[in-house]
Amino acid sequence: MWASPTIIERMGLEIVGVSDCHYNGTPPYHERVLAVNIKDGTIEWTFTPPRLLQGDPACDWDFGATANLGTGSRGVPTFLGVAGKDGTYYSLDPATGELRWQANVVFGGFAGGFIGSTAYDGRRVYGATALGDVGRFEPSPNAAGCEPGNPQDQLIQEPSMHAFDVVTGNLVWQQEQSQSFGATTVAGGMTFVGTGISKQIQIRDAATGLLLNTLALPAGSDSGVVVAGNALFFGTGTSEQGTPAGVFAYTPLGVPPVLRTRPQGAIIYWDHDEQQDFFIDPAGPSGTIVPTWDPNGQMCLFPDGSGRFVTGYNPTLPEQGLGTFPLMNPPVGEAVWDRHGNFTGQTIIVPGPYTNPGSTIGGDIPPDQANSNTFNDNGTYTGCVFDSHGNLFAVDIGQAQGACPPPDNGRLIEWFADTDYTTYCILFGPTMGGDAGTGHHVDGSGGLRDPGTLARDDNDNIYVPEGGALDPATGQLPGFGRVLEFLRPSFPADASQCPGPTNMPVTPVSFQVFIQGSPAWQPFPLGIARDPSTHRWAVSSVIGSPAVAWYNDDGTPYIGKGPLPAGNYSPFGIAFTPAGDLYFVDIHISVSPDGSFGPVDKMGNVFRVPFTAGVPSQPAAIATGLSYPTSVTACDPTVQTCPM
């Protein structure tokens, strides 16, 4: 056994590949993949390649590469794959070891097949195969190969660089002259591998296999490449050429390596113009973590410490003038991003029949007929929050975008972590009318009126600002906003308690009014956040005064901090640093002479507000000229992994 193990922490398993010095694949373990129970060492399952069951020649077809593991939310294993010296990549069920798919690319052999470990990025597996069936053979050391009559059994085998689709096993691309004994690395949309013949590092485009660059080396490199900051690190020296041996660092233009260090201040994130930006408190720097590709709504970090996060999304349209981008499927949902702002390919959705053109993945939000079926004005997910179990809650606004008064077809939805967010309950939403295609009454009535960003307390109660609520005295419009507290004990335990066609709880969830706005006090609340410096709640009002006010846990006003008075800004989402400094996004609402109102393009801002003895300073802008910012999120890098 010469492969390093792969640990499936969630299952308590160690995955190892086994070799066979006699090339016979002797049962029960030789040339097989084993799942070992970490606690007691028992074998939970054994994978036997189909070729062994069919009878194969005495070839050197060890498993020596480390297995690739893919996990979903909260460490749930979703992918397990391992490559062998038989030139085959095997995708296995992590729980049982059953074969999902296999893909053979070369014959393999003594110095061939996959010797170095492959790389996995959630969408594809990448790996270089070695030379071929050349070297010392048993039991006939002078033979030309282990199966001389097979035309595929060659001393040098091509192609030698391969990329597989992780779902189907189909080859995405292959390239030649990349034979390697070292591991393949994937990072930043590129693959890196040290070649075994030509003494170079090859850098390819991960999507196409196009050779982007080569780094000539003084000796071969079998070490694998580490990508960190602006540098590539790797070792040189092989059994064929022992000198010069050492560790090399390559950087653009030979500048000194610069490694990313953990920021000392809180990191602030906000959405605007279909992108996600950041700022390191208190004085920067700032930048973009997700370029223009659909983020729209509150950003929420997974509670698993991975640094991954979700945002609401809907299509970036050509008429917005921001460019053309691949459509996420279905048209509206929550997108999952990795800690570096790369789209993982996972969307969290309510399934239904409404798809993007050419797609088979549908959601339950119908096209916006008034805007040529663009989807852009229906069902935007404005708010989200994870509970302590990792379940995701989000609200969509229905048809409230730009509507005054807003309709009551917003929804509060819960997705369950133990199914990797593939099952859900519509906790609260329309109960009549609307679309008949799903039974969900999308765009109907009886739901929330213009819900905003979300928050939760230590008991997993969920707080939902509802900016367009009815007048509490008359039950009529125009009304005054409020904040609702949805009570955790009333939530369903799983999706089975929310049967179709409505997918709403059999027993309705309970909620109460936490804060009630009025014409004189926060008439249109849309943001809520916990202030760690006071252990109180803060609520923003996008219209009226005060702009931000603080509340006790029973909903009564707190006088120890604030309020922030109204000004030339329209606060939507709010967030706090650990020290209690306030950040808020200004969506910048303007009222027209005819009485209509809405956000002004390129007039939005992000403001920072420090406090002295509870008294707010004048808000200072850290970002200006934004279009339609809605939310702001704060991450403390001293206690969690923050996206960067």
Image: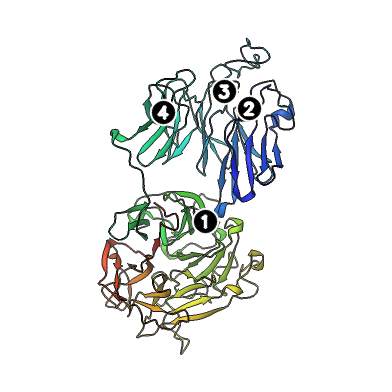
Q: Which mark is residue 304?
A: 1
Q: Is residue 100 positioned above or below 2 on the image?
A: below
Distance CA(mark 2)–CA(mark 1): 35 Å
Residue 583 in the image: state x and y as whole percent.
34, 67
Q: Nearer the viewer, mark 2 or mark 3?
A: 2
Distance CA(mark 4)–CA(mark 1): 35 Å
- The reply to whether dot 4 and dot 1 touch (C-beta < 8 Å) is no
Mark 4 / mark 2, whichever is N-terminal: 2
Distance CA(mark 4)–CA(mark 2): 26 Å
Mark 3 / mark 1, whichever is N-terminal: 3
Residue 496 in the image: state x and y as whole percent.
67, 65
Residue 251 in the image: state x and y as whole percent.
33, 35
- Element under label 1? loop
- Taking the view exactly as shown, the residue that stands out farthest to the front is 40
Residue denoted by label 2: 62
How busy is the neighbourhood of tag 2: few (under 14 within 10 Å), some, or many (20 plus)? many
Residue denoted by label 4: 201
Q: Is residue 514 positioned above or below 412 on the image?
A: below
Looking at the rendered structure, the kind of residue marked 2 is Asp
Looking at the rendered structure, the kind of residue marked 4 is Ile
Mark 2 / mark 3, whichever is N-terminal: 2
Residue denoted by label 3: 112
Q: Is residue 234 left or right of residue 330?
A: left
Q: Residue at x 38, y 68 (%)?
A: 573
Q: Is residue 94 positioned above or below 216 on the image?
A: below
Mark 2 / mark 1, whichever is N-terminal: 2
